[in-house]
Amino acid sequence: MGHDTERKAKYLDTLLLNHLDCQYSQVKTLVKSVVKTVKERSVRVESLIIFRTSYDKRGVNVVVNNVWVLVDGQANERLYMRPLFEFVLGMFKEIFGDEIMFAEPCVVFNDPAAPFPMLVTHSNPIMIRTTASDLKYWSRFIYEVAHELTHYAIRQQKKDKKTILRWFEETICEALSMYILRLAHSRWDKCPLYRCNPAYAQALRGYYVDIYNRTSGSVLRRCSSYADLRYIEDTCQDDREGRSIDRNYLFDTFISMPNDIKTVIYYTQYIQLNGLQVDFDTWKVDNKNSERFIAKLSSIQPAISVR
């Protein structure tokens, strides 16, 4: 870690922990852990942004509400991360509500050297890591952060935070990332960056259309045994194209039934004892108002006959 970065981290540590007003006492522990995480990961720090009450001291921007922390270090991150993240978070709030999207403190940072985007759950606070090579590629940042925000939203309804049915949850996250890109395209004029590039809406559309058009045969539709499904579960993060047709089906479902999307966050409550399937029948009984939507979700699950 460079001396300049270390000095900035120490300055932030002192500033945030000693100069925040008493009304911010509840975020001190969070801020301290964020600074520690930043130091450990050698992330360059120019500012920490914690939504939403503004506090400005000697050029460091700190916005507080105990939940979302953005760490922006590179020049384009300082220019673009906050407006893009606020734009995307606003759409997630519409879908899932404030109670879900402000349920748990989370740090958001970009690391171009990381192998893949990730919701990092083994840290405190949890973190969303994106991997855009440069935040001037707005479409990629939106796509990646939307995927991880979907994991975040689903996490808030998990009785056991470690519970996951990967083949299903990853397909949900991929489809919803595309849906958010489509929504961002239609609402681009509401994003603060619209003033920088009003025509960028077409790039957003091109990004999700390109993903939609890249498909291969469905491994889920070919699945005929629990052994097959276990293999899909274990390899689903490496073989995303194998679920591309099913992803597109869910994407189309989200477009046609947007008011029901929020239902997806409850799926872990219906994972069957085999740990590989969802009990959609019980889920439908418990959620009569979203019965048709849940039935559509169920259609991507392989029909495996018990012999």
Image: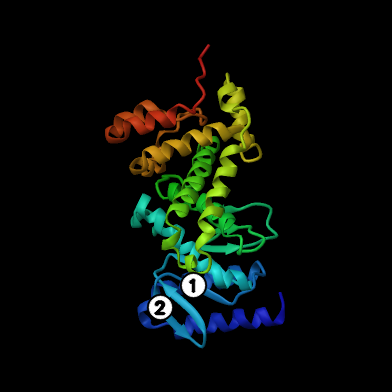
The residue drawn where x is 54% and y is 68% is 80
Residue 218: image location, x then y, percent? 59, 28
| Front in this rendered view, residue 89 or 198 | 198
Please state if 155 lies on the left or on the right of 114 as rendered. left
Residue 54: give its label. Answer: 2
- Asked which secondary structure carries label 2, the reply is strand
Q: Of marks 2 and 1, which one's residue comes earlier in the chain?
A: 1
Find residue 165 and report its horizontal and vertical position in percent: 51, 37
- The residue shown at (53%, 38%) is 171
Q: Quadrant of residue 98?
A: bottom left
Q: Are marks 2 and 1 in contact (CB under 8 Å)?
A: no
Relative to 189, 243 lies left or right: right
Which image quarter holds the N terminus?
bottom right
Count of marks overlaid on the render? 2
| Residue extending farthest top | 307
- Real-space Cα separation, disc 2 to disc 1, in angstroms: 9 Å
- Name the amino acid, label 1: Ile
Residue highlighted by disc 1: 49
Using a 10 Å C-alpha cutoff, classify the residue at mark 2 as few (fewer than 14 neighbours), some (14 to 19) or many (20 or more).
Answer: few
Q: Position of residue 173 (x, y in %)?
A: 51, 44
Kind of residue sitting beneath label 2: Ser
Point 43% across, 38% down: residue: 268
